[in-house]
């Protein structure tokens, strides 16, 4: 990733802000340490000098000027190289005693750099001096070695400088590294979006495998993309289905109308042709509606919340509705459902699902067949089965019957739009129902297992 | 009945209005949701027929606003093929009935008649009576000419619905929706079978016949005029 781009990322700016705040807090901390240390050390030096000055002034007032000179010389002898230095000058600036270079008349406190008295002499030392005017008109100067203080000040300042430099360096470096890694992750999202926009709908954002917030974001986005792709795929499928499979009945309808236009003589004949055409139109609209339903169920599902449904009662109603149709074919519908079974779902959709299955059984079983609708609770899993002793579905075709418009060769001649089982599959998927086709030896056994209630 | 039809497709609205007028209703047409709201709240109506998709203001929102302003006139929603949730959403918004386009015109007329007489039908009766046929809703018993009739629960619901709409035509779809709670066509003759079973119990051996078949439309239970 190029550097200018990095500098413009929000993470880089955040890092810089953080570094600035961190430096400020370090500055305050070091300032306090610096101030406290110098205050304490200066105070110690000042106190030592002051007590010496007071002692010498007292000696002057008690014993006179000569005694003062002797006293000063004694002290110098005791500690010729400091840490306390003395100088006694008369009013004209002549040195009477002392181991400091001539300074001239000055009063108050001041600092002075002098060559070291002790070898190596090229070393300079800093001396803090108090100068007082004595009653005799002489100037008494007492100084203390302040080299340590100066060195400490320098040490504090220079370490602060280093700290500051290192902090800034780490902050900028860290910012670059961090922004780089974040930018790489973001860039992979961007790249994926661009790919998808360019039409490659199956692209997904790669996961880093670190299970961090970026991975979680990528997972959500991928799930969203899956959903969208399924929706689009569903719509595309519907368009294809319409193009391929609705053309045939529409063509047939057109032929019928054309035929009526040319051949029908009487009003009765025309009315009959119109009746047939309306029936055929209704069948086409049914197919159309079923296609849209399947697409919606597969795409976005239903917005209605699931409710508790009395399954036993629902199955009894479905059986009742198909009873008379079955009787016309001399078939029997038996209900073998446990009482008071409850499942969670959408009543209308589940009714549609069971109706389609029973309708299929009635339609494809020969006369005299018996159809069983059963339901039972097996260790908390509600199972429903719809079994017939009709021709069944050969093993190799069982997966295909859920495809739209798929019809077994044998059933080409019976009515139906080839969407019943697709709708069943879509509704089952929405309800997380495990749907299986089995051999009823002879016949077909459809087994539905509801997901256990949470 | 004074009917307000909110429908934006001129061909559909002309077709519907013409049919309704032939049936003896007074129909006003508006093609825009906002205008529909103003007209619906501006004067009294016996029935509103509202297309779900109209410009200006969506049909659902329009009915929600009409209900919010205290209008209780029955609303019949019309919708094109499609949504799984459409019917429930329509009813939740304040609609009373729902019809998916395209529909047989007889279906619309039957529903218009059923909705048009809702106000006085809403009173809670405990006993329904048509000619000498009586239905007691509390004891769930039926009798005709003083003789008790034994009905299965479904047959009782069917007869109750027919009697509540006595004198009107009820369609097969209306029976499926209200007696069986089926909102799609199961492609069976369950309605026909139950009607014929009910006839066997209610009309057989009695005169006059009360349950009539209206060819190509549905059924009607009525006393001879």
Image (spheres, grey):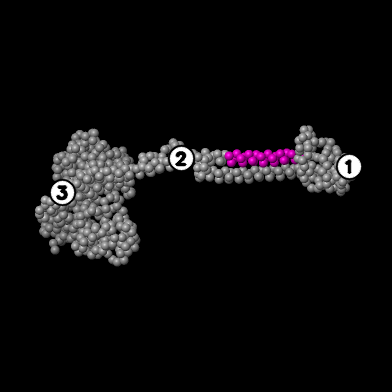
Give the chain letter at badge 1: A
Which of discs 1 and 2 lies nearer the camera? The answer is 2
Residue reaching furthest bottom? B43
Residue A380 at x, y percent in the picture: 31, 40
Give the chain letter at badge 2: A
Quarter holding the C terminus of chain A is top left
Residue B183 at x, y percent in the picture: 24, 51
| Mark 1 nearby-residue class (10 Å; few <14, some 14–19, many ≥20) | some
Residue A50: say if magenta: no
Look at mark 3 in the image and give the residue it sits on: A256
SS for callout 2 = helix
Q: Is the residue B223 above or below the residue A442 in the image? A: below
Q: Quadrant of residue B126?
A: bottom left
Residue B66 got which mark? none
Give the chain letter at badge 3: A
Which of discs 1 and 3 lies nearer the camera? The answer is 3
Q: Is residue A256 visible?
A: yes
Residue A67 got which mark? 1
Instruction: Looking at the image, tell me whether mark 3 or mark 2 is earlier in sequence order.
Output: 2
Look at mark 2 in the image and give the residue it sits on: A185
Q: Relative to the observer, which residue lies in front, A217 or A429?
A: A217
Mark 3 → mark 2, Cα distance in angstroms: 62 Å
Q: Residue at x 26, y 64 (%)?
A: B28
Give the residues drawn in magenta, as a range. Answer: A145-169
Tell me the chief SS of the magenta region: helix
Residue A152: say if magenta: yes
């Amino acid at each position: 990733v190029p550097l200018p781009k990095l500098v413009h990322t929000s993470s880089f700016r955040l890092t810089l802000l953080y570094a600035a705040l961190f430096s400020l807090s370090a500055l305050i901390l070091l300032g306090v340490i610096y101030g406290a240390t110098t205050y304490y050390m200066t105070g110690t030096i000042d106190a030592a000098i002051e007590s010496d000055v007071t002692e010498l002034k007292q000696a002057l007032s008690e014993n006179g000027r000569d005694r003062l000179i002797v006293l000063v010389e004694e002290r110098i002898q005791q500690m010729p190289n400091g840490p306390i230095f003395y100088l006694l000058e008369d009013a004209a600036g002549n040195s009477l005693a002392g181991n400091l270079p001539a300074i001239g008349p000055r009063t108050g406190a001041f600092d002075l750099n002098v060559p070291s008295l002790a070898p190596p002499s090229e070393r300079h030392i800093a001396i803090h001096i108090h100068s007082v005017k004595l009653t005799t008109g002489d100037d008494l100067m007492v100084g203390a070695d302040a080299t340590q203080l100066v060195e400490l000040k320098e040490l504090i300042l220079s370490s602060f400088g280093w700290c500051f430099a290192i902090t800034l360096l780490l902050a900028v470096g860290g910012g670059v590294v961090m922004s780089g890694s974040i930018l790489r992750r973001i860039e992979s999202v961007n790249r994926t979006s661009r790919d998808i926009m360019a039409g490659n709908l199956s692209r997904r954002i790669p996961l880093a495998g670190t299970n961090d917030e970026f991975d979680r974001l990528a997972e959500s986005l991928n799930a969203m993309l899956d959903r969208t792709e399924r929706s689009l795929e569903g719509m595309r499928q519907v368009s294809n289905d319409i193009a391929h499979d609705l053309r045939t009945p529409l063509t047939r309808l057109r032929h019928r109308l054309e035929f009526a236009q040319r051949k029908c003589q009487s009003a009765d004949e025309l009315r009959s042709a119109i009746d047939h055409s309306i029936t055929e139109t209704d069948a086409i609209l049914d197919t159309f509606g079923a296609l849209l339903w399947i697409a919606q169920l597969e795409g976005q599902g239903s917005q209605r919340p699931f409710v508790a449904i009395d399954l036993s009662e629902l199955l009894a109603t479905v059986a009742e509705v198909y009873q008379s149709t079955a009787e016309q074919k001399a078939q029997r519908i038996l209900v073998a459902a446990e009482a008071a079974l409850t499942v969670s779902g959408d009543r209308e959709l589940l009714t549609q699902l069971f109706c389609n299955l029973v309708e299929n059984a009635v339609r494809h079983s020969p006369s005299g067949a018996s159809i069983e609708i059963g339901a039972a609770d097996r260790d908390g899993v509600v199972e429903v089965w719809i079994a017939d002793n009709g021709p069944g579905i050969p093993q190799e075709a069982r997966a295909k019957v859920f495809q739209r418009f798929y019809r077994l060769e044998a059933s080409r001649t019976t009515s139906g739009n080839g969407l019943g089982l697709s709708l069943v599959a879509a509704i089952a998927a929405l309800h997380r129902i495990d749907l299986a086709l089995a051999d009823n030896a002879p016949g077909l056994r459809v087994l539905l297992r509801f997901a256990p209630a949470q | 009945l004074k009917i307000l039809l909110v429908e934006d497709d001129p061909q559909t609205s002309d077709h519907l209005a013409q049919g309704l007028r032939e049936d003896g209703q007074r129909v006003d047409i508006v093609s825009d949701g906002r205008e529909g709201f103003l007209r619906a709240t501006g004067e009294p109506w016996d029935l509103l027929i509202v297309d779900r998709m109209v410009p200006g203001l969506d049909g659902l929102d329009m009915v929600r606003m009409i209900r919010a302003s205290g209008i209780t006139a029955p609303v019949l929603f019309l919708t094109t093929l499609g949504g799984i949730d459409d019917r429930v959403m329509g009813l939740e918004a304040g609609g009373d009935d729902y019809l998916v386009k395209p529909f047989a015109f007889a279906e619309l007329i039957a529903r218009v008649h059923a909705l048009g007489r809702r106000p006085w039908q809403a009173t809670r009766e405990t006993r329904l009576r048509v000619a000498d046929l009586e239905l007691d809703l509390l004891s769930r018993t039926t009798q005709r000419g003083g003789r008790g009739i034994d009905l299965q629960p479904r047959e009782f619901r069917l007869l109750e619905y027919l009697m509540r709409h006595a004198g009107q035509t009820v369609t097969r779809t209306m029976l499926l929706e209200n007696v069986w709670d089926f909102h799609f066509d199961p492609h069976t003759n369950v309605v026909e079978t139950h009607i014929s079973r009910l006839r066997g119990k209610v009309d057989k051996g009695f005169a006059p016949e009360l349950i009539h078949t209206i060819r190509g439309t549905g059924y009607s239970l009525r006393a001879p005029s």
